[in-house]
Image: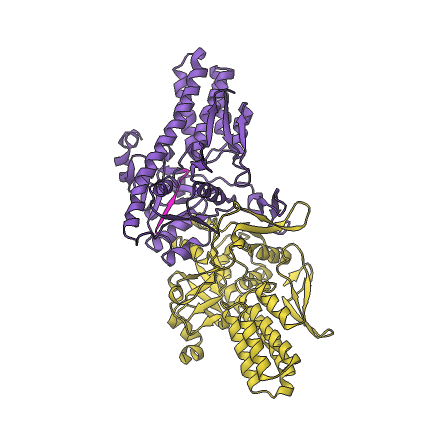
Chain colours: A yellow, B purple
Amino acid sequence: MKIGDKHYRSLWWDHSQQVLQIIDQRRLPYEFQIQNVESLQDYLDAIFQMRVRGAPLIGATAAYGIAHAMSQDPSDNNLQRAWDALYATRPTAVNLRWALDRCRQVMANTPEAERADVSLNLAHNIADEDVGINKSIGEHGLTLIRDIASRKNDGEPVNVLTHCNAGWLATVDWGTATSPMYHAHDANIPVHIWVDETRPRNQGALTAWELGNHGVPHTYITDNAGGHLMQHGQVDLVITGTDRTTSRGDVCNKIGTYLKALAAFDNNVPFYVALPSPTIDWTLSDGVAEIPIEERAEKETTHIQGTNSSGSVDTVRVTPECTPGGNPAFDVTPNRLVTGLITERGICEASAIGLAKMFPEFAKAT
Amino acid sequence: MKIGDKHYRSLWWDHSQQVLQIIDQRRLPYEFQIQNVESLQDYLDAIFQMRVRGAPLIGATAAYGIAHAMSQDPSDNNLQRAWDALYATRPTAVNLRWALDRCRQVMANTPEAERADVSLNLAHNIADEDVGINKSIGEHGLTLIRDIASRKNDGEPVNVLTHCNAGWLATVDWGTATSPMYHAHDANIPVHIWVDETRPRNQGALTAWELGNHGVPHTYITDNAGGHLMQHGQVDLVITGTDRTTSRGDVCNKIGTYLKALAAFDNNVPFYVALPSPTIDWTLSDGVAEIPIEERAEKETTHIQGTNSSGSVDTVRVTPECTPGGNPAFDVTPNRLVTGLITERGICEASAIGLAKMFPEFAKAT
């Protein structure tokens, strides 16, 4: 999407340097910095340190990681070594595994001498496919926003709440949850986005940065505020992303999503989840029982990063010195709280039947 | 409660200086600083700037503010001037009005020459009464914790989640929501407290500071985490405070309380609200419809205070520079989500009947 007047993707292949370029998202929203990813360690760091983040972007980055490994040493051994190392960086992200498995499968049918070229083209394809998927998600989600807008007075914005950053920065372009918002804005439908700050890592600041750069009206709120806004009719629609969706439509997303879903349900606000189909884990059904939740460093809860009064990025400690912090990074929203799933093929019910109808070829396979 | 080995209240009268002393809570949890409150402007600042905070403590501070005004000029005019100025500092806090009205009523029956002494004694009484009320709340709430503990294995802690700081710092002593926790800890019942950080002002850091100083085991979590913990059986009980409770038991408390109540309800976790009866506004019934919600400065959402790496208190901006912030400070939890109210007279249902049975003299009057 746009930064100022220029269009960017969140990663791209620099053909002159023959190297992947990414936006270092840890420096956002304070500083816009482009980085080269040159070694396997760079790839591992990029994912593990969350320079790139978001399920689809992690998947595409990992595919380029395999391509890099193949350019160095196209042996089966090295393929497995790269697969293992890349997989270990963020085990919760199902797209990561999906992309890695796809690369490994293609490599299995490719002679070693061709693996470097084939894997690089495959990474390009995975990136382009993601853009296509997110564009489709946006077109389908747009119908929901258009429908609400049609019941409003002229010029009155559709208020959409979102949690975390399922924006274009978390994908290759468009974003998942944000794609319907960008599509609506670009179609001159007035929208206003309530952006949850999304503690502990404040990814809402990234969403605010994105929306601001693309010119979409928005307001940054604490994660505590959404319930109150819904009680008072100030939210027309919730759209979030998901890191992992089960075959029956339970949604594992950034911690706190479940609380917003409860509030939406309690106030009859439609709660939609935007997802590219690679995010669906067809092997799982009951998300609360079956999905292991990553516990991240406690420092993320006790310390917060921002820019200080002299403009430098700094970290402050919010708590007393010896306060222990707990930091589950995701939660699961049961399908009963989800109004619908916005996929690249259309909108379906968050249920085993809804998903099976939309993706019969995958549902049958399990 | 204890700070190290010494027992403190959150305000006290210094008889030698004839002045009120408070703990400047804006400097907590980084710095423990005692301040003199000497002029009416000091009193207004103390409340408005949240050097003192929490409904009961605001009420007691305001009573001392009236006493100060009476010591300067005991006329009716000055009484009204002080009443107006003090009331305007935090209009949501019903205790503030309750304390001010009580002082005005007593002054009306007191000759001017005696007003300084009478109002000072009245302020002492209001402070002592608050301590007594909170002690009673703790004793009643203790029965809930003791009951849960009796169903656990020996040594296994009772996990209590709390939101904001309804601790001793927010009252004169004991706190409201924390009083059952301190009583349980002091009675050697093992408890572990999940402390919501409570954005935007991170009052959870105060709760953590209190609990740590008194030796109560606890873990600081983001406001997003509680739902997930409840889904996984890691919360036995929620206890929060309230700034204002309606006659049918709707609870207006720090923004985000409603989300925790929804999660507790969805997971069959008992959700109790601890309240001194002066917090009940008998003139209101439907809290969502009738209670105006204070919108505070947007900077509270976009900036966060803490200590930086060199140990100084600093504020960092989390968002991009031009991001607008929304900051509703409270929300209302409807009585249907509240398991019970812990009052100084005992535990009752969160309903008009429950409250009327517990406080027949007030319920009748409206």
State the residue in front, B63 or A149. Answer: B63
Q: Is residue A196 left or right of residue B232?
A: right
Task: Please identify the residue farthest to the front as the structure is shown.
Answer: B5
Residue A224 in the magenta stretch? The answer is no
User: Residue A172, can we see it?
Assistant: no
User: Residue A192, can we see it?
Assistant: yes
Q: Is residue B355 left or right of residue B219?
A: left
Q: Quadrant of residue B306?
A: top right
- Residue at position x 32%, y 46% from top? B145
- Residue at position x 30%, y 53% from top? B152
Q: Is residue A362 above or below residue A273?
A: below
Part of the protein shown in magenta: B236-243
Q: Is residue A304 above or below residue B10?
A: below
Q: Quadrant of residue B105?
A: top left
Task: Please identify the residue farthest to the right as the structure is shown.
Answer: A16
Residue B241 in the magenta stretch? The answer is yes
State the residue in front, A3 or A154. Answer: A3
Q: Is residue A342 above or below residue B201?
A: below
Quadrant of the drawing holding the N terminus of chain B: top left
Residue B196: x %, y % from top left: 45, 48
Residue B136: x %, y % from top left: 32, 35
Residue B3: x %, y % from top left: 47, 37
Q: Count all numbered tags in the image, as a single digit.
A: 0
Quadrant of the drawing holding the C terminus of chain B: top left
Residue A177: x %, y % from top left: 52, 62
